[in-house]
Amino acid sequence: MDVDTHKKIKLKAFNVDREIIIKVIDNGSGIPTDEIGNIFTPFYTTKIEGSGIGLSLSRQIMKAHLGKLLVKSVPGRTEF
């Protein structure tokens, strides 16, 4: 599948059954299936200069506010 070369980020917010859902969607290369299970692990990174705390911390903040942080990813589309 060809990935769109124009970088795009979409933000969507809506209410479903009294839950507020916020989606952040991009059209990047996606997260490989062998890595997706690790992306919320503290200090896990695939970047040379990454610390690996961003997604882990984000998930902890969401849990502290009784929320969830989920991810779906395929080549050309990642959604949090």
Image (cartoon, rainbow, N blue to C red):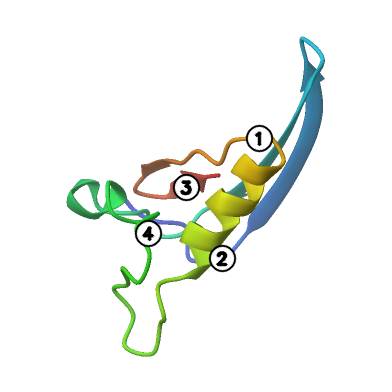
Q: CA distance from mark 3 to mark 1?
A: 19 Å
Residue to which mark 2 is pinned? 6
Q: Nearer the viewer, mark 4 or mark 2?
A: 4
Q: Nearer the viewer, mark 3 or mark 2?
A: 3
Query: Looking at numbered disc 2 in the image, what kind of residue is underneath it?
Result: His
Residue 18, how many percent across, how many down?
Answer: 82, 14
- N-terminal of the pair, mark 2 or mark 1, is 2
Query: Looking at numbered disc 3 in the image, what kind of residue is underneath it?
Result: Thr
Disc 1 is placed on an element classified as loop
With 19 as the anchor, is 26 left or right in this view? left
Q: Tag on residue 29?
A: 4
Query: Looking at numbered disc 1 in the image, what kind of residue is underneath it?
Result: Gly
- N-terminal of the pair, mark 1 or mark 4, is 4
Residue to which mark 1 is pinned? 67
Residue that protrudes farthest toward the front in the picture:
64
Quarter of the image for residue 46 reads bottom left
